[in-house]
Image: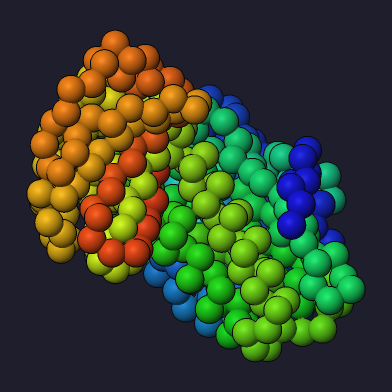
C-alpha cells in the first residue's frame, strides 16, 4: 500500500465532484458538494444508531439497498433533522433533482445533510444549488467537495492510498467531516470513500462494516451520537481487476487499505475536536477478549473528567482507572498498569491498580504534547484495542454555547 500525497477523491478513476457555495451558510462559504461515479458502482454504508434519525438517513437506508449507487449529494449548514414529513419530502426532492441533472435513477442517489437540527431546508436555495453543483462536477473538484462538507471543522479531512489487486493498481480515497457531536456508536460523523476496485456488493459490505468497528466506532469527542451520522463507500470497478467475490488475497489487501483509511480519517476527526488542543490515543492491552478491550478504551476516551485532566496536563491516573472500572468490562482491578507516552518519552504512573512514585514534571511535559498516548495493561489475556479522542477545553463550551447564534 502507498499513501498518495496531494491526491483526493477525484484522482480515483471515474470519480467527478464539485463543491459550491449555495447560500445555505450565513458565511457564504462552500456548503454543497456532489460526488458522481461512472461505471456500475456498488456501495455500502453504515448509519447512526440514534433513534432520532434525520430525514436523509431514513431515505438513504432504503436507497443503499439498490444494486447501484452513482451519486452523493451533501449539504452543510442544515441537518434536515427533526423536520417531520416536510423534511422527508424535501430530501426526496433533493435526490430527484440530482437524478434529473445527472441522468440517473432517484434510488441511485444518496443525500446527506449536516448542520443545525430542527430547521427546514430553504428549498428555494438548495434546489438550484444542487443543479449548479451537478453542472460543475469535474475531475478537479475533489478538494472543493472536501471543503463543502465542513461545519465547525478547522481542517479538510482527506486521504488517498493505492494498492495492487492482481496486476492492477487500485486507488482508494476518502473525505470526512466531524469535530463535535462525536461519540463511538457508528458512525459518529460523515465519511465518503470511493475506489475503482472491482468487487461485489456483498464483499464490499462485509469489508466496510468490519473496518468501521476498529476505526469510527473507536473515537469520541464529546459523547454525543448525532442524528445524521453516516459513513459510506462506492466501488465502481473501473480498475478492471478480476472481480473480488470471496475472501481471497486481493480482498485481504483491500481490507487492510480500508482499515488504514478509515482509522486515519477517524484520527483526523478526533484531533479536530471542537476546541481541542491535543489528540489522545488510548491503547488497552492484554484483555480477556476484544470486546472487553474495546469497552475499556472507549470508556476512557469518552470520560469528560479524563479529558479535562488532559487539557490541564494533570497526570490524574485515578480518573483513567475509574473510567476503566465503569466500562462494564471484565478485568481484575488489582492487575492494571497505566503509562503515558509521547514522542519517545514514556512514564509509568500506576502499577497493579495503585499509584507509583513518578516524576510529575516529566509527566506534565508529556501531557503538554499535541499527541499523547495512554497505555493500559490489563494483564488478563491477549487482546488489544485502541480508541482516539481529544481533550475538553474552554473553547468547546464556547463553540457549542454559541452554535445556533
Q: Residue furthest right?
A: 167
Horizontal side of 108 relative to 375 (left or right) equals: right
Up-down relation of residue 37 to residue 183 (above or below):
below
Could you say where residue 52 lies in the image, as x and y percent from the top left? 26, 61
Up-down relation of residue 238 to residue 221 (above or below):
below
**Depth check, front residue: 272 or 164:** 164
Q: Quadrant of the N terminus?
A: bottom right
**Depth check, front residue: 297 or 120:** 297
Q: Is residue 47 among the parts visible in the rendering?
A: yes
Could you tell me which residue is drawn at 76 percent across and 52 percent down?
Answer: 2
Could you say where residue 367 lies in the image, as x and y percent from the top left? 35, 21
Could you say where residue 194 lies in the image, as x and y percent from the top left? 69, 61
Up-down relation of residue 354 to residue 327 (above or below):
above
Could you tell me which residue is drawn at 44 percent across and 25 percent down?
Answer: 345
**Depth check, front residue: 163 or 377:** 377
Q: Is residue 119 among the parts visible in the rendering?
A: no
Q: Residue furthest top?
A: 361
Horizontal side of 371 relative to 67 (left or right) equals: left
Could you tell me which residue is drawn at 53 percent across and 78 percent down?
Answer: 206
- Which of the 4 image quarters holds residue 28? top right
Could you say where residue 384 lies in the image, as x and y percent from the top left? 37, 58
Number of numbered discs overlaid on the protein picture: 0
Q: Quadrant of the C terminus?
A: top left
Horizontal side of 4 relative to 299 (left or right) equals: right
Amino acid at each position: 500500500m502507498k499513501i498518495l500525497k496531494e491526491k483526493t477523491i477525484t484522482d480515483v478513476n471515474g470519480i467527478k465532484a464539485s463543491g459550491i457555495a449555495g447560500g445555505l451558510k450565513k458565511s457564504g462559504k462552500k456548503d454543497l458538494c456532489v460526488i458522481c461515479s461512472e461505471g456500475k458502482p456498488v456501495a455500502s454504508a453504515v448509519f447512526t444508531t440514534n433513534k432520532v434519525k434525520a430525514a436523509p438517513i431514513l431515505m438513504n437506508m432504503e436507497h443503499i439497498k439498490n444494486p447501484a449507487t452513482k451519486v452523493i449529494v451533501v449539504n452543510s449548514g442544515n441537518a434536515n433533522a427533526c423536520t417531520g414529513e416536510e423534511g422527508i419530502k424535501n430530501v426526496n426532492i433533493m435526490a430527484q433533482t440530482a437524478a434529473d441533472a445527472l441522468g440517473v435513477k432517484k434510488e441511485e442517489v444518496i443525500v446527506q445533510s449536516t448542520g443545525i437540527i430542527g430547521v427546514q431546508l430553504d428549498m428555494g436555495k438548495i434546489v438550484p444549488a444542487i443543479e449548479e453543483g451537478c453542472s460543475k462536477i469535474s475531475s478537479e473538484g475533489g478538494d472543493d467537495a472536501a471543503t463543502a462538507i465542513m461545519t465547525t471543522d478547522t481542517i479538510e479531512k482527506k486521504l488517498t492510498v493505492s494498492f495492487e489487486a492482481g496486476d492492477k493498481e487500485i486507488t482508494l480515497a476518502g473525505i470526512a467531516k466531524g469535530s463535535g457531536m462525536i461519540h463511538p456508536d457508528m458512525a459518529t460523523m460523515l465519511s465518503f470513500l470511493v475506489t475503482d476496485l472491482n468487487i461485489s456488493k456483498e464483499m464490499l459490505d462485509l469489508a466496510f462494516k468490519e473496518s468501521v468497528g476498529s476505526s469510527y466506532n473507536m473515537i469520541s469527542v464529546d459523547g454525543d451520537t448525532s442524528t445524521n451520522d453516516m459513513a459510506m463507500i462506492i466501488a465502481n470497478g473501473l480498475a478492471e481487476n478480476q472481480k473480488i467475490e470471496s475472501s481471497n488475497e486481493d480482498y485481504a489487501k483491500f481490507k487492510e487499505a480500508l482499515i488504514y483509511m478509515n482509522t486515519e480519517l477517524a484520527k483526523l476527526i478526533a484531533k479536530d475536536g471542537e476546541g481541542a488542543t491535543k489528540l489522545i490515543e488510548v491503547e488497552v492491552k492484554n484483555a480477556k477478549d476484544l470486546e472487553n478491550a474495546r469497552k475499556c478504551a472507549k470508556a476512557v476516551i469518552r470520560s469528560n473528567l479524563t479529558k479535562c485532566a488532559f487539557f490541564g496536563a494533570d497526570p490524574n491516573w485515578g480518573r483513567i482507572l475509574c473510567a476503566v472500572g465503569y466500562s462494564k468490562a471484565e478485568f481484575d482491578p488489582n492487575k492494571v498498569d497505566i503509562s503515558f507516552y509521547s514522542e519517545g518519552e514514556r512514564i509509568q504512573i500506576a502499577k497493579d491498580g495503585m499509584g507509583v512514585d513518578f516524576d510529575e514534571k516529566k509527566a506534565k511535559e508529556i501531557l503538554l504534547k499535541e499527541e499523547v498516548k495512554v497505555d493500559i495493561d490489563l494483564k488478563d489475556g491477549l487482546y488489544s484495542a485502541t480508541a482516539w479522542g481529544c481533550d475538553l477545553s474552554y473553547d468547546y463550551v464556547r463553540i457549542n454555547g454559541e452554535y445556533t447564534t
